[in-house]
Amino acid sequence: MRTFLLSASVIAVMSSTIANAQVGPAEAPAATIQKTPQSSQNPVDATDPNAMPGDTGDDIVITAERRSTSLQRTGVAASVLTGEDLVRKSVNTVEQLQFSTPSLTVNTSGQANSFNIRGIGKSEISSSVGVGVVTYRDGVPTFPGYFQSEPYYDIQSVEVLRGPQGTFAGGNATGGAVFITETNPTLDRVKGFATAQYGNYDQVRAQGAINLPLSDTLAIRLAANLEKRDSFFTVTGPWTGNPGDLNAISGRASLLWQPDSHLRLLVKGDYNRINTGGFPNSPAYFGSAAAPVLNTSDPFTVSSNSYLSGQDEFGRISANLSYTYDSGLMIRSISGFQKGTLQETIDADGTAAQNNTFQDFVNEHVWSQELNIVSPDTGRFTWLIGGFYQFDKYEFPVDNGYVALAPAGVVRSLRIEGTNPHTAIAAFGQVGYQLTDGLQVTLGGRWSRTTSRNDVNYPIELFLGALPTFKTVLVQHDFNANKNVDGKLALNWTVDANNFLYAFVATGTKAGGLNGANLFGTTPRGFVPEKVTDYELGWKGTLLNGHLRTQIGGYYNSYRKFQVLIVDPATPNFTSIFNVPNATKLYGFEASAQGSFGNLLFDASTSISKSELGEFFARDPRKGTTGTCDPVTGPASASGCINLGGRRQPYAPTFTLSAGAQYAITVADGVSLTPRVDYAHIGAVWGTLFQTAQLGDYLKARNIVNAQLTLDNGTWSIAGFSTNLTDQHYIGSLNGIRRLAAAPRQYGVRVSTKF
């Protein structure tokens, strides 16, 4: 969030991915799960407005369209992971979703991340730029791009939707949306689980949950997650503290009140404090950008001369109130409040040679409210209408900001003080009509208005030795507003009980915003919303008497007004967010399958994609910034002015593949031994549009192997696990001049019980 006013070539955040095995309930990993994984801990009524996968017992259910529908009968490209899937596949954080979902990359940059689906999402670590992939928890949109380190514990399901979701998921779902449902309380009985884990890097983790019915109409559920781990990094140089150490605590309390079959109130409160000790990082290259020497050293061996620190502390309260009439008509309200505090100190150059330090302290508050009226599912005609409001405010306290010490002893201090509020208001709806028993047409739309305001001061000081040589304060009071209309037209054909075809055209929009002020008095320019138009065809099949499910589809996207960070053409000493003037093309193919044959469970997914950036001229912010380079006209003959047209979208792999399998071996009556292996390949990507390998822009392919061996008697289980089994050391993402390492191999033992 802090870099919305500062140059991304100087100010950035280090990545620290946590590739631990997901700790969760001790569910038997054998073939008790048949056609569809179902939560044996917490079965849910399929008529429940928060019903999630497994609710019908024989089908995967998604709720992304604000009602419970079968994944195999919904015209959307999606992947669904149940809580048991998360345990089996070692998905513990948002970063690990990419190893189980096609077309997805998640690049964690310290206390922020770049979440991209099909190459669309967020590639600039800046609070000026919104996210293109919205994450919801229990129906509440979470912090946009920050405070994403919240662990996955006591989770009921995760739905990953690919492609723009402009109708339901708001005016910033250009790439897709993620819907996370935490396990809800139930009224049936006392139950729960407890887990303890120990692994390398002295990782200690404890997790558990308990469901407590207080009456026939009232129940609570309490859950917690605690973790400590030593750093992955070897840090040398005059630094202090424990950079890279993890000390995290998370807790959740949920309350369900259901006095009758009509009225239902679900309230949840989440708290997280995640202290990383800072984010060690290393430069992508040495020397100048004009004559770079690529850094090929181990990314976990780091030199630093800055005190490092980093902590996220944040919480969320959500309330889901619904009333369902006898006719099936439902009225629902989803309210949310979130508050977070981010604190960090980083070594901005990633070396012990230069004294470049960035310090940051930011508060963020998010209020949101959604209202839905959902028609009954019966009859040929169905409909839904809704409204949405969100207020998101960044607060930059006095003395917050960036301080750099140049090698020659010139001290440059640039701080940010003030507020940066954003608002979004929307009205949306969808209608569906059953033309025949198997053929349905749906039409949905969403009107939205978004605003962004900068009310900030920028104290700037330059020192030569102990005396200030230049001191000033820039003041900015600017406002930007945008209105957009998005929609979706779909045709769904249920050919028979085992085959479903769909085709649709849909749009999605990511809000515009404001660039910061600069030293030369130029009026800060806003940037307009970017918009995606998506054309898709798909087939979903249920084969072999329900033992095999498949989802296959193709897409073509026209991506207009793509928001990028470049050297400001009017003020070359600064970088600014601009819109690519010509459309970018993205197209590809995706396929996935899930199989269950007795004691054997397996799944696989793959994607092949291409992208071509629209014609666009820009200078690399890491290189010289003088002279004219117009984004539309160039000229390409000007020094450093590059025509970027036709280049591949950042963080858009051409090929992804994931596959996993497990087999339950009966070793005694009621006791099983289950080995499982998961493999994921994410093809090489470019970290920037400038695609200069010598500057570290080329990020090699990721090949990740996870393995588990679980002994289970139905109540207790003990598992040995390893993530990144081959210990691949790779660069997870690039941020400015710094490379950000992903997690190395981790392994350990996990003991779980359920009751």
Image: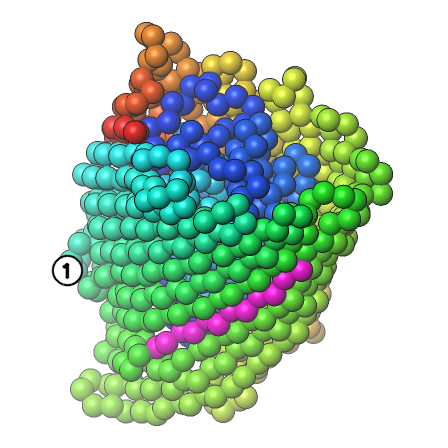
Relative to 31, does residue 645 appear above or below in the rendering?
below
* Residue 161 screen position, x and y as percent: 58, 46
| Residue occupying the point 63% across, 21% down | 546
Quarter holding residue 618: bottom right
10 Å neighbourhood of mark 1: few (<14), some, or many (≥20)?
few
Looking at the image, which is closer to me, 405 or 343? 343
Q: Is-magenta flag for residue 352?
A: no
Q: Which residue is mark 1?
A: 240
Looking at the image, which is closer to me, 430 or 249? 430
Quarter holding residue 593: top right
Relative to 131, does residue 362 appear above or below in the rendering?
below
Looking at the image, which is closer to me, 581 or 455? 455
Q: Residue furthest top?
A: 668
Q: Mark 1: which amino acid?
A: Thr
Q: SS class of the residue under badge 1?
A: loop
* Residue 223 screen position, x and y as percent: 30, 45
Task: Say whether residue 518 is visible.
Answer: no
For the magenta stretch, what is the residue range? 385-396
Relative to 292, does residue 551 appear above or below in the rendering?
above
Q: Is residue 242 left or right of residue 81?
A: left
| Residue occupying the point 76% across, 43% down | 379
Q: Is residue 448 left or right of residue 738?
A: right
* Residue 382 screen position, x and y as percent: 73, 49
